Amino acid sequence: MQTFRYAKSQIAIHWLAAALIVFLLVTGTFVLAELPNTPAKTGNLRIHMILGALAGLFVITRIVLRKRLPAPPSSAGDKLARAGHLALNLVVLLLAVSGTVLALQSGAFDAVFGAGSLPEDFRQFTPRQIHGLASRVAMGLIALHMLAALYHQFIVKDGLLARMGLGSRKPDRLR
Ligand code: HEM
Ligand code: HEM
């Protein structure tokens, strides 16, 4: 029964990852990027690095689960949805990888978890440009993803959010 939903593990990890990613995007933009690289910044950076790596692991877990578990029956606009989900997964992975490379290359990793000091400014490093750009692309994709979900839920009225555990489905409307 209930094959129209993703598995409980997939639903849990989707919402955990979503909350984490929104937190990282907001605090990254409005806190981290605004702070000068003084030693006082290392606490913030530590949280960002750990949670950022966790977000990357969530996405990998999600991709593995998606391959292993039977998928719920496809929804309307399936091709577009698949392309959108692929793009979302890729951009979050790119954020985790570019962030990690930046931390290693700039010495921030040592400063935060060891004894080094922070670079004067992260912006001199190419992975920082990639990380910043990817964060803006992620914001755009997430906004589109939310709009698409809300469009299905409230305009098409096909109960799409039930696939991610919210509410009940309208069986005749979801293919
Ligand atoms: C904020 C970051 C978010 C990311 C990165 C994200 C990513 C994804 C991905 C990759 C999928 C495909 C399923 C999977 O691979 O596990 C998915 C499905 C879904 N998401 Fe999100 N999501 C986010 C937030 C949201 C929000 C805020 C909503 C609700 C407004 C939402 C509603 C859904 C729904 C309903 C599905 C199932 C769609 C279908 O099966 O066609 N997501 N999401
Ligand atoms: C999904 C995961 C991640 C998200 C959503 C994310 C998001 C962000 C955002 C929005 C910014 C500010 C960009 C700007 O305003 O230009 C930022 C900066 C940064 N992030 Fe991440 N990040 C993630 C993962 C990581 C990881 C894994 C690391 C390192 C291990 C990392 C290290 C950094 C560093 C060093 C900065 C620069 C801060 C500065 O310029 O002062 N990030 N991140």
Image: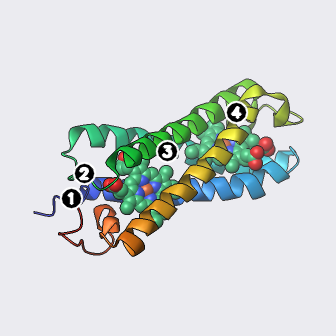
Q: CA distance from mark 3 to mark 1?
A: 23 Å
Secondary structure beneath disc 4? helix
Identify the residue position indicated by label 4 in the image.
130
Amino acid type at image mark 3? Leu
Q: Position of residue 47 (x, y in %)?
A: 64, 50
Helix, strand or loop status at disc 1: loop
Q: Nearer the viewer, residue 153 or 139?
A: 153
Q: Earlier in the sequence, mark 2 or mark 4?
A: 2
Question: Looking at the image, is 12 positioned above or below residue 56?
Answer: below
Q: Earlier in the sequence, mark 1 or mark 4?
A: 4
Check if mark 2's residue and mark 1's residue have beta carbons within 8 Å.
yes
Going 56% across and 49% down the picture, which residue do you hit?
A: 51
User: Which of the two labelled residues, at mark 4 and mark 3, occupies the earlier sequence position?
Assistant: 3
Residue 126 left/right relative to 88: right
Residue behind mark 1:
175
At horizontal 75% and vertical 34% (from top left) the residue drawn is 129
Of the pair 47 and 8, the residue shown nearer to us? 8
User: Label 2: how many residues lie within 10 Å, few (<14), some (14-19) or many (20+)?
Assistant: few
- Name the residue tied to disc 2: 74
Mark 1, residues whose alpha carbon is within 10 Å: few (<14), some, or many (≥20)? Answer: few
- Label 2 sits on what residue type? Ser
Mark 2 Cβ and ligand 1 under 8 Å apart = yes
Separation of residues labelled 4 and 3 (CA atoms): 16 Å
**Direction from residue 130 to residue 155 in the image, left or right:** left
Q: From the image, which quarter does the N terminus lie in?
A: bottom left
**Looking at the rendering, which quadrant does residue 37 occupy?**
top right
Q: Earlier in the sequence, mark 2 or mark 1?
A: 2
